[in-house]
Amino acid sequence: MIAPRLWPRQRFTRSRSFDYDGRDSDDADDVMRTTIDLPDAKHRQLKAISEKRAISLGQLISELTDIALEGRGAPAPATTLMASQQTGLLTLSVGRPISSDEVSSLMETM
């Protein structure tokens, strides 16, 4: 009996890929290879961070995913003190809007 011919002809090749830590992916069952779509600007930012930390982009994304899944979230925004362009008075930026109740509470503690 003759085996039926596959149409279109299929070629089965074994490709070899390496994970972000250099291990052969065939030996690392705990790593899933995936594709993500990022806007160019975000890709450039992430790539710059990974190069600054001397780690691969994949490792950086893995670390950021761990942080998000652990619920640690983003680090607290930096507090800045600068002069307002409109009034020239000093303005304190804490990374979020401040309510008048919070200002009153702070004034009472001073």
Image (cartoon, rainbow, N blue to C red):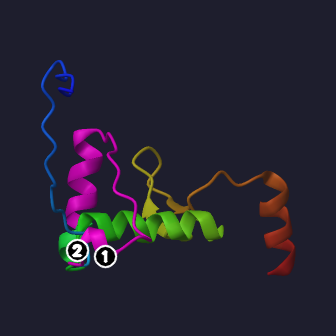
User: Disc 2 designates what residue?
Assistant: 24
Mark 2 and mark 1 in contact? Answer it, CB < 8 Å.
yes
Q: Is residue 26 magenta?
A: yes
User: Disc 1 designates what residue?
Assistant: 27
Query: What percent of the width, then of the height, locates residue 83?
Result: 43, 60
Quarter placement of the N terminus: top left
The stretch of residues the image draws in magenta is: 22-48
Q: Is residue 28 magenta?
A: yes
| SS assignment at label 1 | helix
Q: In this view of the protein, can residue 77 be seen by the observer? A: no
Q: Note whether 6 is above or below 80 in the view shown.
A: above
Give residue 68's quadrant in the image.
Answer: bottom right
Give residue 31's quadrant in the image.
Answer: bottom left
Q: In this view of the protein, can residue 57 be seen by the observer? A: yes
Instruction: Name the residue located 54 percent from the left edge and 70 percent from the top edge.
Output: 67
Asked whether 75 or 110 is in front, the reply is 75
Query: What percent of the width, then of the height, locates residue 40?
Result: 22, 41
